[in-house]
Amino acid sequence: MRLVVAITGASGAIYGIRILQMLSALGVETHLITSKHALLTLTTETDWTPDALRSLATHVHPVGDVGSAIASGSFQHDGMIIAPCSVKTLSGVANCYADNLVTRAADVTLKERRRLVLVFRETPLHVGHLRLLTQAAEMGATVFPPVPAFYHEPKIIDDLIDQTAGRVLDQFGLDAAVARWEGMRPLKQVVDEQGATEQILTDDPANG
């Protein structure tokens, strides 16, 4: 498998890092693009250097190289991930404004009917953001906000990051062996204020 991975300047560079690490462990060929602001965010939020980040990828493409192989629909790949995806990049994708290699490669991915996953990292959202997200989804992109799950009882921040990164890879049929929902426990007991145990979930559908 071959995937294009872009990291932009939104907060959450660690998502792109972890996705690259997982893809490398799975033997997936990766083509990395980093925006100028992505590298600034990287060094602000993490201990990673730009060179260390690039070492995770199979191939690295300069963000200004719109003549790169991945800028063409004739370049065969299995999809693209933008993690994290900034508002600026979302706007470029939604409006087909391909002024750099990230947005050009994303536009090519969509026009060739390949999967494009946008790990959009912004909150709260105003109506302009919502319209852009809707527009991108209507064009075929998968909008994937990095919303943490808690059913796997995470103990450290890495548990949250790994679960989100693994779920992104699920979009491409890749199993990174992340924690998965296994259904509600059939019976759970809690201790009430008096120290007695109370059955709060039963097999009785009437209990909702």
Image (spheres, rainbow, N blue to C red):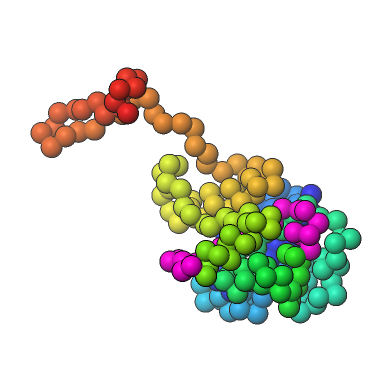
Residue 34 sits inside the magenta stretch: no
Reply above or below: 92 against 188. Answer: below
State which quadrant residue 42 falls in.
Answer: bottom right
Considering every residue shown, the one lying at the far left of the view is: 194
State which quadrant residue 89 falls in.
Answer: bottom right
Q: Residue at x 48, y 67 (%)?
A: 127
Q: Quadrant of the C terminus?
A: top left
Residue 109 sits inside the magenta stretch: yes
Considering every residue shown, the one lying at the far right of the view is: 74
Q: Is residue 199 left or right of residue 170?
A: left
Q: Is residue 46 left or right of residue 197?
A: right
Reply above or below: 117 against 84. Answer: above
Q: Position of residue 63 (x, y in %)?
A: 74, 76
Between 162 and 181, the residue placed more toward the observer is 181
* Range shown magenta: 108-127
Q: Position of residue 194 (x, y in %)?
A: 10, 33
Q: Is residue 107 left or right of residue 22?
A: right
Between 135 and 191, the residue placed more toward the observer is 135
Q: How many marks?
A: 0
Between 92 and 170, the residue placed more toward the observer is 92
Query: Can see residue 185?
Result: yes
Q: Residue at x 82, y 65 (%)?
A: 70
Q: Position of residue 2 (x, y in %)?
A: 79, 54
Q: Is residue 110 left or right of residue 73?
A: left
Q: Position of residue 61 (x, y in %)?
A: 78, 71
